[in-house]
Image (tube, helix red, strand yellow):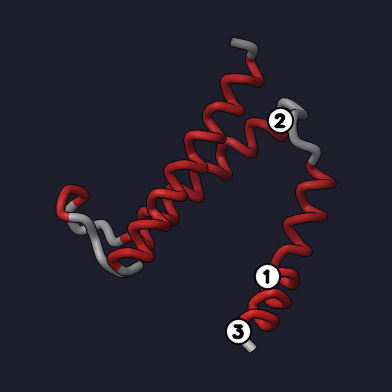
Amino acid sequence: MEDNSYYLVCLMEECAEVSQVVAKSLRFGIDDSHPKTGDIPNHELLSRECGDILGVIDCLLDMRVINEDILMQYRTRKPDRIKKYKEMYNG
């Protein structure tokens, strides 16, 4: 496996883990915790998994697989786009 392929697989896996925590948070509540994870609430698990994604993104930036200028451009415009579509659908 090419070096950047390994990190891309890591990113894919971390995104899947975030998806799972989000699903559990929606299903059981963001402040709830799973009996197997002990006292760790879903919002903390989500924070941990998002941190893992950011760590992998840092690796991909260092390897120049991801362009930092493009990343920041889209990162800074996303909140406004989310608000716009939320208002459109929620009235």
Foreground disc of the pair 1, 3: 3
Comes first in the chain, label 1 or label 3: 1
Q: Residue at x 73, y 77 (%)?
A: 84
**Label 2: how many Cα within 10 Å (few below 14, some 14–19, many 20+):** few
In this view, the mark in front (2 or 3):
3
Question: Mark 2 belongs to which amino acid?
Answer: Asp
* Tally of marks: 3
Please tell me how crowded label 3 is: few (under 14), some (14-19), or many (20+) other residues with Cα within 10 Å.
few
Under mark 3, the amino acid is: Asn
Q: Is residue 58 left or right of residue 78?
A: left
Please, is residue 47 above or below residue 69 in the view?
below
Residue 89, image x, y percentages:
64, 80
Q: Quadrant of the C terminus?
A: bottom right
- Residue 66 horizontal/vertical position (percent): 75, 35
The residue labelled by disc 3 is 90
- Left or right of 8 in this view: 19: left
Label 2 or label 1, whichever lies nearer to me, is 1
Q: Position of residue 47 (x, y in %)?
A: 44, 55
Using the image, determine if residue 90 lies above or below residue 44.
Answer: below
Q: Name the secondary structure under disc 1.
A: helix
SS at mark 2 in the image = helix
77 lies above or below 13: below
Residue receiving disc 1: 82
**Residue in the image at 55% along x and 26% along y:** 9
Residue 44 lies, in percent from the top left, at: 36, 58
Residue at mark 2 to residue at mark 1: CA–CA distance:
28 Å
Residue type at tag 1:
Ile
Instruction: Tell me the residue that label 2 is attached to.
Output: 62
Q: Quadrant of the N terminus?
A: top right
SS at mark 3 in the image: helix
In space, the residues marked 2 and 3 are separated at their CA atoms by 40 Å
